[in-house]
Image (tube, helix red, strand yellow):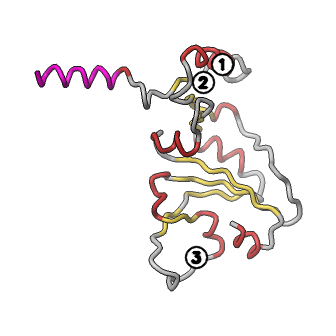
Amino acid sequence: MEHYKIAKGLRSILGLCFSRTSETFHHWKIFADGMSGVCIELNYKKFINSLQLDPRFRYGNVAYKIFLSVDQPPLEVDEIPFAKRYASHDESEFRIIFEDRNAQPDFIHLKFDIKSIQKITLSPWIPKQIFGSVKNLLNSIPGCETIKINSSSLIESENWKKFIAKSESELL
């Protein structure tokens, strides 16, 4: 990103990274480890429409490049913020970048319609008693009353346990 920033003459480049795939253990451990992790599922069209008002934003899917040698043809400058090595392709990443030639903010506020939030999934490691309190708190926020909020069942799935128990009983 630093090379891109210099090549484009920017004072600031900020980024947000999203995944366009279902939750995985990898996502939770790498990007949101611990009981405070949160996955917010957005309605893509509603969310993006609110960002199109400002020309300092660019967005797109990340292209995963197979890197064989430094002798490969280089990327186009505008491709750099949306390229990663192929080893990361499981992330199925989507990025939004903010570019500014004049200002150098540490952060920016993204305003978007709260109705673009489809679902909130809390960490698979959040204790059940804390989950209930957090869910009630989030649903008490104006506009969030109907948002589906659940705790990830990635590591403690009751349905998976029943399926395994059924499979075990059929083997016996």
Q: Report x, y in % for residue 132.
A: 59, 15
Mark earlier in primary sequence (1, 2): 1
Q: Few, some or many C-alpha atoms within 10 Å of disc 1 (few <14, some 14-19, many ≥20)?
A: some
* Secondary structure of the residue carrying numbered label 1: helix
Main secondary structure along the magenta-highlighted residues:
helix
Task: Say what amino acid the circle numbered 2 marks.
Answer: Ile
Tell me the distance, in whole angstroms, between the alpha carbons under discs 3 and 2. 41 Å
Q: Report x, y in % for residue 100.
A: 82, 62
* Secondary structure of the residue carrying numbered label 2: loop
Q: Which residue is mark 2?
A: 147
Q: Report x, y in % for residue 90.
A: 45, 53
Q: Which span of residues is magenta-colored?
A: 159-172
Task: Say what amino acid the circle numbered 3 marks.
Answer: Leu
Choose mark 3 or mark 2, whichever is in front: 3
Q: Answer yes or no: do the residues labelled 1 and 3 have beta carbons within 8 Å?
A: no
Task: Say what amino acid the circle numbered 1 marks.
Answer: Asn
Q: Report x, y in % for residue 36.
A: 63, 31
Q: Residue at x 57, y 31 (%)?
A: 118
Q: Residue furthest bottom?
A: 71
Q: Residue at x 47, y 44 (%)?
A: 26
Q: Is residue 132 above or below residue 11?
A: above
Q: Which residue is mark 3?
A: 75
Tell me the distance, in whole angstroms, between the alpha carbons under discs 1 and 2. 7 Å
Q: Which residue is mark 1?
A: 139
Mark earlier in primary sequence (1, 3): 3
Q: Answer yes or no: do the residues labelled 1 and 2 have beta carbons within 8 Å?
A: yes
